Image (cartoon, grey):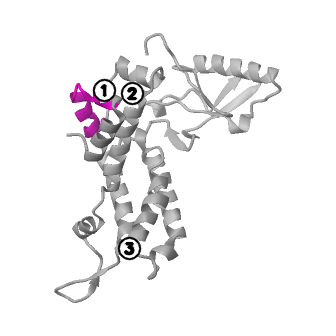
């Protein structure tokens, strides 16, 4: 962006070196190795990997290993940074698989509570919203969902709601049957998981815009050139409204906009 380039992402000892090409990455990595050595720190070759990220990254084959002086780093197809999985083609499938898997583990771990005849339905809904859904939606502020991902998340949520509300008796056959999607929606009476993701995205956008001096705000102002392959409809709606930045400055007003949805 302009003349500014980010070459390093660092959180405690979780480091990620960035570059537009391998030569830049090698140069920055060599600097890090030298500086770390002066402090008595060493790079662990087995725990250090490199990933080439891009829509055509699979076609680019520089080699299985990247060698820097006496170090040899293996190429990977993805890596986890601060709890989120970043893949070489920037696809959400692996992240979605992991999030839903973790949500299922949490759900089955609480299975006795969701099957309990003692706990009320209201309390079970509260358990879902406070213990399970946050696990699934970790990092969702930066997601760009396609229909396939939205469907998977909706199916996951409906599975839990069906367990909470239980089956019902069919008025025609007088047999027990699972509840239909419309029935679950009428019973739940809360924004579904996709609406919650949209709300979080807008909340995060407002937070990023209000933070003076941040690089994220600079990116929003600069509007970097390049083709956007996928963009969510709620983001398009915000971009069409020239007053969104002014609205985001008012924290309370922006909160109400996020709750009501942007139209």
Q: Is residue 114 visible?
A: yes
Taking 22 as reference, is 103 above or below it? below
Q: Is residue 208 left or right of residue 244?
A: right
Is 52 magenta? The answer is: no
The secondary structure type at the circle numbered 3 is helix
Mark 3 or mark 1, which is nearer the start of the sequence?
Answer: 3
- Mark number displayed over residue 169: none
**Looking at the rendering, in which quadrant would you find the C terminus?**
top left
Q: Is residue 91 left or right of residue 74?
A: left
Residue at mark 2: 209
Q: CA distance from mark 2 to mark 1?
A: 7 Å
- Image: 156 above or below 45: below
Q: Residues within 10 Å of mark 2 (few under 14, many from 20)?
A: many
* Residue 218 in the image, given as x and y percentages of width and height: 42, 19
Give me the C-alpha separation between circle 1 and circle 3.
40 Å
Q: Earlier in the sequence, mark 2 or mark 1?
A: 2
Residue situated in front as seen by the camera: 236 or 242: 242
Where, by quadrant of the figure, is residue 187 drawn? bottom left
The percent coordinates of residue 79 (x first, y second) are: 57, 39
Dividing the picture into quadrants, the one containing residue 209 is top left
> Which of the labelled discs sits on residue 245, or is there none?
1
Q: Residues within 10 Å of mark 1 (few under 14, many from 20)?
A: some
Residue beneath disc 3: 121
Q: Which residues are magenta?
A: 231-248
């Amino acid at each position: 962006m302009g003349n500014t380039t980010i070459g390093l992402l660092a959180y405690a000892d979780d480091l990620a070196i960035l570059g537009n090409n391998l030569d830049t990455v090698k140069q920055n990595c060599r600097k890090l190795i030298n500086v770390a050595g002066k402090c008595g720190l060493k790079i662990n070759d087995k725990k250090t990997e490199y990933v080439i990220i891009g829509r055509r990254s699979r076609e680019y084959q520089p080699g299985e290993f990247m060698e820097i002086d006496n170090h040899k780093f293996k190429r990977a197809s993805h890596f986890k940074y601060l709890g989120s999985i970043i893949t070489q083609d920037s696809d959400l499938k692996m992240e979605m698989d992991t999030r839903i898997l973790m949500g299922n583990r949490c759900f089955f771990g609480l299975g006795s509570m969701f099957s309990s005849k003692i706990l009320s339905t209201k309390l079970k809904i509260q358990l879902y919203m406070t213990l399970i859904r946050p696990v699934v939606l970790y990092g969702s502020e930066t997601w760009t969902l396609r229909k396939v991902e939205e469907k998977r998340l909706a199916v996951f949520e409906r599975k839990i709601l069906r367990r909470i509300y239980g089956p019902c008796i069919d008025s025609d056959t007088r047999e027990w049957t699972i509840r239909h999607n419309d029935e679950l929606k009428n019973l739940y009476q809360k924004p579904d998981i996709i609406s919650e993701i949209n709300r979080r995205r807008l909340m995060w956008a407002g937070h990023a815009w209000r933070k003076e001096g941040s690089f994220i705000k600079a990116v929003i102002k600069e509007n970097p050139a390049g083709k956007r392959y996928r963009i969510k409809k709620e983001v398009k709606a915000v971009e069409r409204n020239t007053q969104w930045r002014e609205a985001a400055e008012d924290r309370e007003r922006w909160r109400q906009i996020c709750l009501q949805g942007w139209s």
